[in-house]
Every structure is written in C-alpha cells, then in structure tokens.
Image: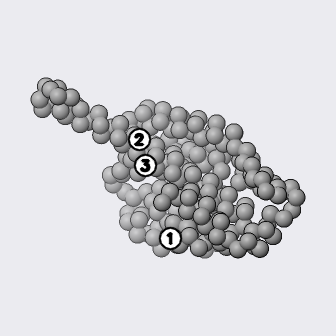
Amino acid sequence: MDIFKKILYSILQIHEKHLTKKLEKHFKSKSSNSTTKTVVSKGVTMTLEAETIKNKELAKKNVIDIINSCNNDPNKLLAFVESKGTKVVKLDNADKILAVIKEEEGLITELKGLEALFINIITESKISFKSEPVFIMRNGDLDPYYMDHQFYKWYALKMNLPGYDYISQKLFKIYLNSTDTILSELNLDEMLGLKEAINRDQEATTLALEIAKAKEGSKKVLDKIKNDGGANI
C-alpha cells in the first residue's frame, strides 16, 4: 500500500476524542519548517507549500547537474560534499559500526544524546552530546546509485527542505522499523514532520532510480550496438 495511504488510514484510526482535543482550537497553525505550513481550523486543513515545491524542483535539477558533472563518481560527489563544509569520514566496516546505533552508511543527520556522542567519537569530532550532519561511508568501492540517493538527501538538507530536523528524522527511523501504530501516538506537528521526512526519502529514491534506469538503459543500447550492429533496437 502506498505509504501516504498508510499514514492517512492510521490518522483516521486515532480515537475521535483524542483527535478532537488537538483540533478544537478555532484556528491553529503548525509548520514543519519555514517553507511548509499547515493551517488547521474546525473542519478545514490547508497546507501551504509553494516554496517547498519550488525548492524541491530546484534541488532535483541541481543534484542531477552535479552528478552528471562528476560523471556519477561517488568519490567526486563526496569531495563536493566536503567542499561545502560537511565532514566526510570513511571507515572500515562502516556498516557494522553504524549498526550499533541503528544508522546506515551515508548521510547521518543531526543526532543528540549518546548516539551523537558515539558519532562524534568515531568521526574524531568534538566531544559533545550533539552532532553535526556528517557523511560516513565504507572504505573501498561505493555503489554510485546508493551514493546518488544519499547525495540528494544531503543537498535537500543544505537547501533547508523540511523533514531533516532532529525529531522528524528520529520518528522516520522509528517508523521504518516499527508498525504503523506509532502514528497513533504522535501529535499533529510530529505527523507533519514525519510526512516530510518520508517525502525527502522517496524523492531521493526516485531520483536514484531515474538515474540508474537512464544509465543502464543507455548501456544496454550501446552493448547491443557493439554486439549486432544496432539491429532491432
């Protein structure tokens, strides 16, 4: 089932009294960040996201341009990330190390508490219970399409697209590893933040798939030309 339908169905299952209590104010505004705002009044919900849509389209265009200029080379993309002020760290067995705090290779967004301390220690950053966004990847060859996925998320973060704040990312990670029942425990602001985090991840996945299809499709055509002179293409 489409993930947005899952969210919608789960929201509708929230106890009527609980939902009414959160929406009973005559006019209340909640926002994921400065570019997306959801206004809730009695019987009416309106989302204002023109700036987010514009930034999202610009992010996709810029990311594709950068990836093409780097020939989709993961190491060149990492060099670009580092040139813009985000720390890049390569570690042997990065996947196993990050699994300790249930993180995956790639962009690690802001963390707090013991998880942040762990990240700061393994990246040789300052000792703190709050960490800055960082790229952590394994040593050796990197999958270009996975890197494309992570690069889009990083670029969207740099463009201040919503869904990257600490709470939204934390909820997103919980949501990926739990049942839909988590939604019944969230307030409106948290649900909006989670929705934005899901949006950013889906956008990254879609972009990586588009690049992979274009690349692999072109490769198949070239291979066919080499093999049979282009017949039946």
Residue located beneath label 2 in the image: 210
Q: Pointer 1: residues within 10 angstroms few (<14), some, or many (20+)?
A: few
State the residue at coordinates (86%, 62%): 25
Image location (x, y in percent) of residue 6? 55, 62
**Separation of residues labelled 1 and 3 (CA atoms):** 22 Å
Q: Is residue 127 left or right of residue 2?
A: right
In the image, what residue type sits under mark 3?
A: Met
Rendered image quadrant of residue 48: top right
Residue appearing at x 68%, y 58% in the figure: 192
Q: Which of marks 2 and 3 is in front?
A: 2
Tag 2 near tag 1, CB within 8 Å? no
Element type at mark 1: loop
Q: Report how far apart the C-alphas of labels 2 and 1 lie in the structure.
A: 26 Å
- Which element carries disc 2, helix, strand or loop? helix
Residue designated by label 3: 147
- Callout 2, which amino acid? Glu
Residues at marks 2 and 3 touching, judged by CB atoms closer than 8 Å: no
Name the residue located 36 percent from the left edge and 51 percent from the top edge: 142
Res 27 quadrant in image: bottom right
Viewer-nearest residue: 45 or 59 = 45
- Which residue is disc 1 drawn over? 177
Camera-nearest label, 1 or 3: 1
